Amino acid sequence: MTRTTYISDEYANEMNMAGIRYQQPPPISGPIKIDLIWCTYLHRPCSVCGAEIEKKSVVAESHWVRVCENCLLYGDQIDEILARHASRIEEKAKAIRAMIGRLQVPTYKAWREEQDRHDAYHQGIPVEEVREKRQRAREEHDKRLRESLPREWLDKYDLLTDQGRKDFLASRKEAGLKIDPATAEVIMTWAGMMDPYGIWGDDIEDNIDRAWFACAPGSDIWVEFHDLPEETRKALEGKPVANADELKALFETLENCEAVVEGDTVTFLNTEEELRDDYERRLREKGIKPLKDPPF
Ligand SMILES: [Zn+2]
């Protein structure tokens, strides 16, 4: 008599597909049912206790909510664990907010000079030589940046100076004030979170993520959502994007990338997280060009 139970391909396929059905936020009210799924991708912390958990092959998850096995072990205390986790985050937010108006920071110039002394020491060269090297790198950087920015922007703003960038950003905010959510056009693309217009070039080490831009009819100024008045932003959130077809086409040009595009919601299927970052980088590179009146 055999005692080994083999698992069928049908069962495995079903379990592998289970996670894909839940790529959306949890319902606003009512119970949130968590399933067991065979995990082929994504690494996320436990939504209940907040712990960073190792990637497991089987996870309890649905609707972006993941429950680690430790929390399953204490399943009868899940609400207490949730409450503790929430108040920890609230305390952290309070501590961050309490710093507003109280931070006394060194100047950028002071940091720069200290960095030069550090580099001079470690490279065994005079501080002056460090500065010269930096100056040459600066010129190279500015040349690359100038080549990457739209002509119209450079004609209007001196984007290689702090003042020029300030003027540029002020003009986005000003255009944002004139945007009427009822008539505005919205697009989604990939952009740096700190520098969504790309005006700092490599000066900012940025996380690339999805970003939304709005534009008033007849205007050619695309305003990133965070530069909009809060009310306008809220009214525009979830508005269908005008470049949905382009986004879809974009994904079709990427090899080995399985993704479902619905409106501006992109769901990566069987991809590892590192690959995902790479896709997003490539998408940003590609995504910039097909857009009408490109914001970059
Ligand atoms: Zn947990």
Image (tube, grey):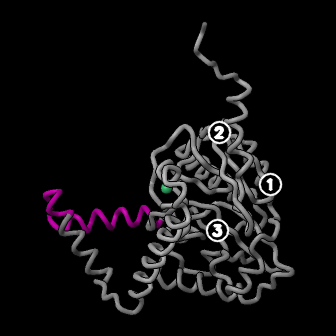
* Left or right placement of residue 186 versus residue 192 in this view: right
Whole-number angstrom distance, CA of label 2 to CA of label 3 = 36 Å
Q: What crowding class fits label 2: few (fewer than 14 Cα within 10 Å), some (14-19), or many (20 or more)?
A: some
Element type at mark 3:
loop
Question: In the rendered view of the protein, which quadrant contains the C terminus?
Answer: bottom right
Q: Position of residue 230 (x, y in %)?
A: 67, 85
Q: Is residue 120 magenta?
A: yes
Circle 1 residues within 10 Å: few <14, some 14–19, many ≥20: few
Between residue 254 and residue 79, name the one nearer to us. 79
Q: Secondary structure at mark 2?
A: loop
Q: Earlier in the sequence, mark 1 or mark 3?
A: 3
Which quadrant would residue 205 be assigned to in this image? bottom left
Q: Which residues are magenta?
A: 119-142
Residue drawn 68% across the image and 87% down it: 229
Residue in view at x 86 percent, y 80 percent: 183
Q: Is residue 1 magenta?
A: no
Of the numbered discs 1 and 2, the one sitting upstream in the chain is 1
Please tell me the numbered disc located at residue 158.
none
Q: Which residue is mark 1?
A: 262
The residue lying toward the viewer, choosing from 43 and 168, is: 43
Amino acid on which the number 3 mark rests in the picture:
Pro
Q: What distance separates the C-alpha of mark 1 from that of mark 3?
A: 30 Å
Q: Is residue 113 above or below residue 248?
A: below
**Mark 3 = which residue?**
150
Q: Position of residue 201 (x, y in %)?
A: 50, 65
Image location of residue 286, percent across then percent down:
67, 52
Disc number for residue 270: 2
